[in-house]
Image: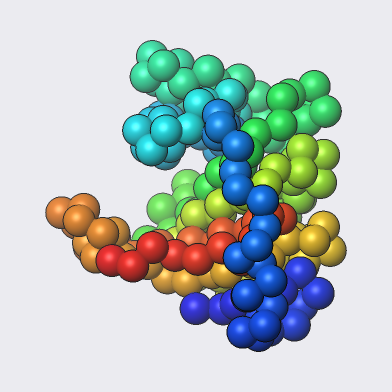
């Protein structure tokens, strides 16, 4: 696990003590998502007590599923969204397409992906909305990608604390071994991962 301050330095015990005195989160907690898919992560946030504000999904068929699941989803390319027109959430969740980073690499021939453009859209959304928290979720190989490196640097520049790790869903009670790269960024205090 990486613990790094917004300045890019490693956190120290005295830094952590100062952070514990930060203001508590005020209710209601809100969430928005990019690359919403069918809205499953959004439903999980709602189950945890967050109020869902909006999601963005490019594929109209998949956006229809998210809307059917009760997730207010905008069907648009994340690179073309005017984020200043959307309400700012407490937490922004982004799970960019992972096909180019997956071990399975199921991308169809002739289907180019603009990974840098999509990561840039996440950076732009964060810089515009300045949510208190950001969660990035992807396959393990994403943590070594230039897209993640650029996004992580942008988070530091914007004053976020960032922690990241590989987590196995099985360790958290999900009946499936599914290892994912998870990064949590916070402008409020030092984020941490729950113990399995």
Quarter in which the C terminus is drawn? bottom left
Task: Compare residues 102 and 6 and report the one nearer the observer.
Answer: 6
Q: How is the image coloured?
A: rainbow
Q: Residue at x 53, y 18 (%)?
A: 72
- Residue 59: % across, % down: 53, 27
Q: Nearer the viewer, residue 133 or 70?
A: 133
Left or right position of 128 against 45: right
Q: Residue at x 52, y 26 (%)?
A: 52
Residue 86 shows in this picture: yes
Q: Is residue 101 above or below residue 24?
A: below
Q: Is residue 168 above or below residue 88?
A: below
From where the camera sits, is residue 112 visible?
no
Name the spot of residue 82 as percent of width and height, x first.
Answer: 80, 27
Q: Is residue 170 left or right of residue 131?
A: left
Residue 47 placement: quadrant = top left
Q: Along the horizontal axis of the image, is 192 left or right of 160?
A: left
What residue occupies the far front of the structure in this picture?
A: 21
Image spot of residue 11 (x, y percent): 66, 81
In the depicted structure, whether residue 86 falls above or below residue 110:
above
Left or right of residue 116, residue 56 in this image: left
Figure check: 1 above or below 145: below
Q: Who's the residue at 58% across and 24% down the image? A: 53
Observer-nearest residue: 113 or 17? 17
Q: Residue drawn at (81%, 46%), measured in percent from left and top?
A: 127
Image-quadrant location for residue 22: bottom right
């Amino acid at each position: 696990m990486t613990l790094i301050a917004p300045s890019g330095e490693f956190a120290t015990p005295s830094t952590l003590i100062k952070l514990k005195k930060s203001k508590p989160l005020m209710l209601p907690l809100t969430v928005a998502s990019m690359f919403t898919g069918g809205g499953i992560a959004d439903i999980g946030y709602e189950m945890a007590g967050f109020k869902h504000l909006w999601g963005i999904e490019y594929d109209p068929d998949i956006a229809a599923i998210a809307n059917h699941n009760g997730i207010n989803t905008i069907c648009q390319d994340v690179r073309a969204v005017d984020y200043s027109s959307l309400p700012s959430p407490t937490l922004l969740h982004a799970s960019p397409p992972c096909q180019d980073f997956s071990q399975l690499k199921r991308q169809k021939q002739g289907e180019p992906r603009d990974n840098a453009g999509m990561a840039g859209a996440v950076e732009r959304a964060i810089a515009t909305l300045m949510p208190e928290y950001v969660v990035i979720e992807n396959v393990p190989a994403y943590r070594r990608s230039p897209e993640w490196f650029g996004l992580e640097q942008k988070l530091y520049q914007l004053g976020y604390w960032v922690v990241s790790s590989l987590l196995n869903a099985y360790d958290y009670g999900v009946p499936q071994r599914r290892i994912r790269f998870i990064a949590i960024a916070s402008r409020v205090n030092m984020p941490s991962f729950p113990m399995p």
